[in-house]
Amino acid sequence: MNIFNSIKTTALLAGLMALMVFVGQLLGGTGGMIIAFIFALLMNGGAYWFSDKLALRMSGAQEVTPEEAPELHGMVADLSQRANLPMPRVYIIQSEAPNAFATGRNPQNAAVAATTGIMQILDREELAGVMAHELAHIKNRDTLISAIAATIAGTITFLANMAQWALIFGGLGGSDEDDGGIAGLVGGILMIILAPIAAVIIQMAISRAREYSADAVGAQIVGNPIALASALRKLESWIHKRPMAVDPSTAHMYIVNPLSGSTIAGLFSTHPPMQERVSRLEQLAMQRQTAM
């Protein structure tokens, strides 16, 4: 699992660099390509070291101490011990929308975040199931890939916007007499159309498989697959009533799609079907009962 995730992380960072260089060449020729290459190196470093901090800041999460949130801290500490993980930092997001996510480049630098809404609608066992799911992401080392994917998705969206403005002001393709003008124009239009789609594809490709795995490992950590299944049912119901106002580039990080029912971005689900996730957890519970 760790080797596979390392390969995916390397591929994502290499893809980000290639994309930046391509756009730099498209917008500014050789000079633009060189500038973009330097910028891509800085972006890759930033994505690796600071993407988790950026994700927490974008979500509005605030770190809390054991004195400020004793029940949540105690729960995470107990589950971390069961999972044989270092204690992550604990954050709370002031939002009525029920949701949670984990981030961090490795288990030694990890964080879990929960909204005030999720702590209000779930009972203790259900909340423990959710937090175990997030710790499973840390254990599986999904969190680095997830945070980097958020950075890349945000970068692609930014590049699409930049290409759009450059096209409006004639910045793509040079002068009309330039042989590459038409190619640059077409490239700019394609960037505007395809870049947001590419961002969604990146999120979907990374998120769907890892959610099934985190559900299974999380159920193992908490020792109660049905509690997590019950929590997922509640979250699915509530998130349609109270979608979160989050940056679409971070939607794949949450345990349930925070955009459901709020914007057109909610149509591009970054998560597996909820019924399938619940069904797998129920099957896991039946297997555990049979084994007993």
Image: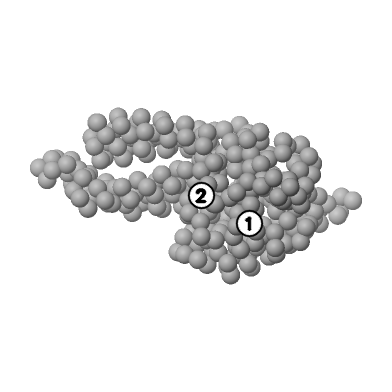
| Alpha-carbon span between mark 2 and mark 1 | 14 Å
Position of residue 34 measured from the top left corner of the image (x, y, whole percent):
30, 29
User: Residue 193 placed where, x, y %?
Assistant: 33, 54
Q: Residue at left 20%, top 50%?
A: 169
Instruction: In this rendered view, identify the residue nearer to me: 230 or 243.
Output: 243
Residue at label 1? 115
Looking at the picture, which amino acid does disc 2 mark? Met
Give, as a three-letter code, the residue at label 1: Thr
Residue 13 placement (x, y as % from top left): 46, 35
Residue at screen point 40% across, 52% down: 196
Residue that label 2 marks: 58
Compared to residue 272, the image places residue 163 above or below, namely: above
Q: Secondary structure at mark 2?
A: helix
Residue 19 relative to residue 236: left or right: left
Crowding around mark 1 (Cα neighbors within 10 Å: few <14, some 14 to 19, many 20+) is many
Q: Disc count in the image?
A: 2
Residue lying furthest right: 292
The answer, for residue 13, to whether it is visible in the render is: yes
Residue 96, compared with residue 45, is above or below; it is below
Marks 2 and 1, the one that precedes in the sequence: 2
Q: Residue at left 56%, top 46%? A: 56
**Which residue reaches farthest left?**
177
Q: Is residue 183 left or right of residue 155?
A: left
Q: State the residue in front, 280 or 18.
A: 18
